[in-house]
């Protein structure tokens, strides 16, 4: 069965002579042996036929083959991962999209997430061979580490062949010792006498053994030299062949056998194209200034085995040894200007919107003017990854200082990019420089206004989380930018991937009304300069209303938010509003409507295909399935607490904790939550996220109650109440109602025994709300179970200890009675009782008794 091959755009189409030459049974057997190992390294200098031999071998296997031809651009780990994801899409579009969204797995947690995605599709019949060519171009420890990690997993039916010009001793030695990897060296790729003679037979040339030995000695078994020397013999007789040692130089061979056979015009075209990693008809026409290069390229490809062509026959790439030969000649050419050619290529790719490649060509030409003009023209939006932004910033940092003096807007653009990079603190210095420049009387008023306006936008972004600190900058920007900001794009995620506006901007207890008022009355200043965040003013009001149990108002404002945000395609605002609607469905017990809204969120994320929204969706799914109680459907990274897999900005991180701790509550793992709470509070502290802080205190109260008793829960409850009471917030006590209800009942019953900040009438009112909320949740879960009968029919599995305690509960034993009967602590009984309630789907002792009777567990 022939292999199915998914190839890079630069994958080879083979010249017949090379196919015959490099299909050698001995080398084939070595490559076959490589399938017994997770990884095989094939290394030898250029011209030993590594790529052709590997592809020939792959064609005759029954493996699905992914062929990845690397370039210098793949040194960037994210670019490398984007490349491999694109190739994977040819086998499975959904898996490839998911891989691309997550990006390069820098952390172990991200690695496991990528592994989960791929392994779901690695069924037994999918034997896959990943061939990575020109690996020596990378030299990136992160990518080395990734491939080593994959190899060590010994994934069934996955084999990796790495083709390199150099030995990768650093990470190969241990793998070879442990028989995880195999190595094929240049010694094994050399042609022996018999293979050389066989190759010449395919050319209808019968060599005597003595002549074969001469050629073998002359070429040292080097495939390219053998191939090129055969061209001599085709032209002339073997007797006339120059076997001088100097002729072994590959450049001499290429020049004599290939390059000199072309016309001057074709030679010039090849020299010009050597600056490109790959090329197509359009860029050839652009660089040559003609529309007639198709025929020239076809002629070159037909007569040159060192030109690669893509599978769709639209893109070309030179073999590296040929490109190196041409590039060396180009650099010494007096007729052609290499800097001018790189500038042309930069202009072409800038026009095509391929920013990073365009900048690389301008940089190669030392064309700082080109870099500056491109940055000034395009400004750049949030569609770039963090790694791409870092690359763009690196080019900015290469610019000589005189360009910042000549084009001060470059300072603003740099600062703007810095706020979204790993070095936001550097933005402050750059903005100070801009403001200093604007003091000069030589700066035209129009230019000054633009600089000061965009600088105000940057300062607003630096004042994130404080609406009142941001407001003066919004007003300042409006003053100077009557037509709006050119820096801010509608594609920027206003919530930075967090599914709640309130989480981000509620930064001071007792100030919620002012924060909401600040947005509803002053946000129009922001809207004057950008569509980014359109609808946020209504959203934060809706979320505040929900926190106060003003459900009708919250629902109306959630829909108003969506209708407004849709006008400017503000997906982050729409997603947050839809999650709020799901919470309202929870309050109503309306599972069906919530399921439809969750699918709406999925559809938005699938269309946007941005990594940050993938994490937002996971958090929405996680929250949804906490409500249903179906923890198995919570995304694995959230379920298992691998929160470093989150792709949201660090400034917006933390909502992930709320989903994960909810999972732990349902598992009854109070000790784990206890260990996490300090980290939660540390995460919420820099921006004083009251939304998270109040919930962390409530969690602490629940944990302390279950582990150490009611007295230890008081301090944490008081701390939570001091935040929520100041802003009339109720919802957190209902969200955790199942776990708080036993605490609140004890507090109400023995109120005078405790030093409480919580008034007794407030406690009693919340208890009533908690019971109503629990009824709605049960209705919601019932709707879910009705739509998922398989789950509803799953038998409840209780441990021996859980069955003992449930039996005693049904017999009327109190918690203290059970503790004495089983010789355990009362806290131990509480923890196990909570687990029983969750497993059997009840929230009270009477419900547990009914379950025990219905299931004949009282006998």
Image: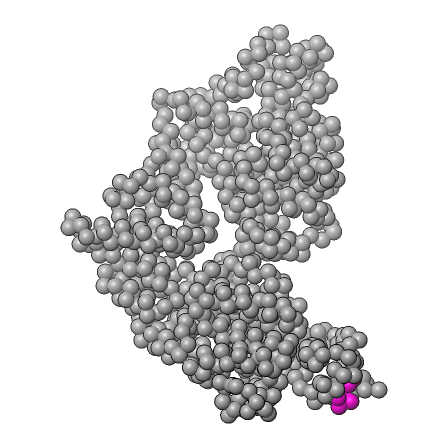
In this view, 349 is above or below 430: above
What is the total number of numbered labels drawn onto the structure image? Answer: 0
The answer to which quarter of the image holds residue 368 is top left
Q: Nearer the viewer, residue 709 or 609?
A: 709
Nearer to us in this view, 678 or 806: 678
Q: Nearer the viewer, residue 765 or 543?
A: 765
Seen at 73% across and 35% down, the residue is 32
The answer to if 811 sits in the magenta stretch is yes
Residue 711, magenta (yes or no): no
Residue found 55% across the figure and 55% down from its top: 102
Q: Position of residue 72 (x, y in %)?
A: 50, 37
* Coordinates of residue 745 in the picture (x, y in percent): 60, 88
Q: Which quadrant holds residue 145?
A: top right
Compared across the picture, whether 27 is left or right of 10 comes to right
Q: Is residue 813 visible?
A: yes
Q: Residue at x 64, y 17 (%)?
A: 220
Q: Residue furthest right?
A: 859
The reply, left or right, for residue 748 in relation to residue 509 is right
Decide: is 62 above or below 328.
Answer: below
Q: Is residue 18 visible?
A: no
Vertical placement of residue 730 versus 420, above or below: below
Quarter of the figure that contains the N terminus: top right
Q: Residue at x 43, y 48 (%)?
A: 390
Q: Is residue 367 above or below residue 597?
A: above
Which residues, given as a range, are shown in magenta? Answer: 807-813
In the picture, the quarter occupied by the C terminus is bottom right
């Amino acid at each position: 069965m022939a292999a199915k091959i998914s190839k890079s755009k630069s994958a080879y189409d083979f010249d017949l002579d090379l196919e015959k030459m490099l299909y050698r049974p001995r080398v084939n057997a070595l490559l076959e042996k490589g399938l017994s190992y997770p990884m095989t390294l094939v290394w030898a200098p250029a011209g030993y036929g590594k790529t052709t031999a590997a592809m020939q071998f792959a064609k005759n296997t029954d493996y699905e083959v992914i062929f990845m031809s690397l370039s210098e651009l793949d040194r960037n780990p994210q670019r490398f991962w984007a490349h491999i994801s694109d190739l994977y899409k040819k086998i499975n579009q959904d898996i490839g999209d998911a891989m691309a969204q997550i990006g390069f797995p820098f952390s172990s947690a991200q690695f496991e997430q990528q592994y989960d995605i791929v392994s779901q599709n690695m069924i037994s019949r999918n034997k896959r061979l990943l061939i990575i060519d020109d690996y020596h171009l990378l030299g990136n420890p992160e990518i080395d580490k990734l491939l080593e990690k994959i190899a060590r997993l010994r994934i069934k039916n996955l084999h990796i062949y790495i083709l390199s010009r150099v030995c990768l001793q650093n990470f190969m030695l241990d793998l070879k010792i442990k028989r995880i990897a195999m190595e094929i060296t240049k010694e094994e790729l050399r042609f022996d006498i018999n293979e050389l003679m066989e190759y010449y037979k395919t050319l209808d040339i019968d060599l005597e053994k003595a002549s074969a030995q001469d050629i073998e000695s002359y070429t040292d078994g080097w495939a390219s030299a053998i191939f090129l020397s055969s061209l001599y013999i085709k032209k002339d007789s073997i007797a006339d062949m120059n076997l001088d040692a100097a002729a072994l130089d590959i450049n001499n061979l290429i020049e004599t056998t290939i390059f000199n056979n072309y016309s001057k015009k074709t030679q010039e075209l090849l020299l010009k194209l050597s600056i490109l990693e790959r090329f197509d008809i359009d860029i050839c026409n652009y660089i040559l200034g003609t529309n007639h290069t198709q025929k020239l390229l076809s002629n070159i490809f037909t007569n040159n085995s060192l030109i690669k062509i893509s599978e769709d026959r639209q893109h070309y790439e030179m073999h590296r040894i040929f490109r190196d030969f041409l590039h060396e000649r180009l650099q010494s050419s007096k007729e052609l200007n290499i800097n001018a050619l790189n500038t042309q290529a930069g202009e072409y790719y800038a026009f095509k919107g391929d920013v990073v490649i365009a900048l690389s060509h301008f940089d190669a030409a030392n064309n700082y003017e080109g870099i500056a003009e491109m940055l000034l023209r395009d400004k750049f939006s949030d569609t770039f990854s963090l790694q791409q932004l870092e690359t763009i910033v690196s080019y900015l940092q290469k610019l000589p200082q005189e360009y910042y003096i000549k084009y001060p807007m470059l300072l603003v653009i740099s600062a703007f990019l810095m706020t979204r990079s790993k070095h936001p603190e550097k933005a402050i210095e750059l903005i100070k420089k801009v403001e200093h420049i604007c003091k000069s009387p030589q700066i035209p008023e129009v230019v000054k206004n633009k600089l000061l306006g965009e600088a105000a936008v940057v300062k607003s972004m630096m004042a994130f989380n404080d609406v009142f600190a941001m407001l003066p900058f919004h007003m300042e920007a409006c003053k100077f930018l009557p037509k709006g900001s050119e820096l801010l794009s509608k594609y920027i995620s206003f919530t930075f991937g967090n599914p709640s506006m309130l989480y981000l901007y509620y930064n001071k207890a007792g100030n919620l009304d002012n924060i909401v008022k600040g947005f509803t009355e002053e946000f129009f200043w922001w809207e004057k300069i950008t569509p980014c965040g359109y609808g946020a003013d209504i959203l934060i009001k809706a979320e505040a209303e929900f926190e106060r149990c003003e459900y009708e108002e919250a629902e109306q404002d959630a829909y108003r938010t969506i209708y407004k945000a849709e006008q400017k395609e503000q997906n982050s605002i729409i997603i947050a509003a839809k999650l709020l609607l799901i919470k309202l469905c929870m309050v109503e017990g309306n599972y069906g409507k919530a399921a439809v809204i969750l699918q709406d969120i999925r559809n938005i994320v699938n269309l946007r295909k941005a990594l940050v929204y993938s994490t937002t969706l996971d958090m929405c799914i996680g929250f949804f399935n906490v409500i249903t109680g179906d923890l198995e459907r919570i995304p694995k990274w959230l379920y298992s607490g691998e929160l470093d897999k989150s792709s949201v900005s660090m400034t917006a991180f933390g909502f992930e904790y709320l989903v994960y701790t909810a999972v732990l509550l349902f598992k009854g793992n109070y000790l784990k939550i206890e260990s996490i709470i300090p980290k939660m509070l540390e995460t919420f502290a820099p921006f004083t996220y009251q939304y998270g802080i109040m919930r962390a205190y409530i969690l602490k109260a629940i944990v302390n109650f279950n582990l150490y008793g009611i007295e230890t829960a008081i301090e944490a409850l008081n701390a939570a109440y001091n935040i929520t009471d100041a802003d009339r917030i109720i919802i957190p006590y209902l969200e955790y109602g199942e776990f708080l209800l036993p605490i609140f009942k004890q507090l109400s019953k023995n109120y005078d025994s405790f030093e409480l900040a919580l008034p007794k009438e407030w406690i009693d009112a919340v208890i009533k709300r908690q019971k109503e909320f629990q009824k709605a949740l049960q209705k919601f879960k019932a709707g879910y179970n009705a739509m998922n009968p398989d789950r509803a029919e799953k038998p409840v599995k209780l441990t021996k200890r859980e069955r003992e305690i449930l039996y005693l509960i049904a017999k009327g034993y109190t918690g203290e009675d059970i503790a004495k009967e089983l010789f355990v602590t009362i806290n131990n009984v509480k923890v196990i009782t909570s687990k029983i309630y969750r497993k059997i789907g009840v929230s009270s002792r009477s419900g547990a008794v009914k379950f025990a009777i219905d299931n004949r567990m009282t006998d």
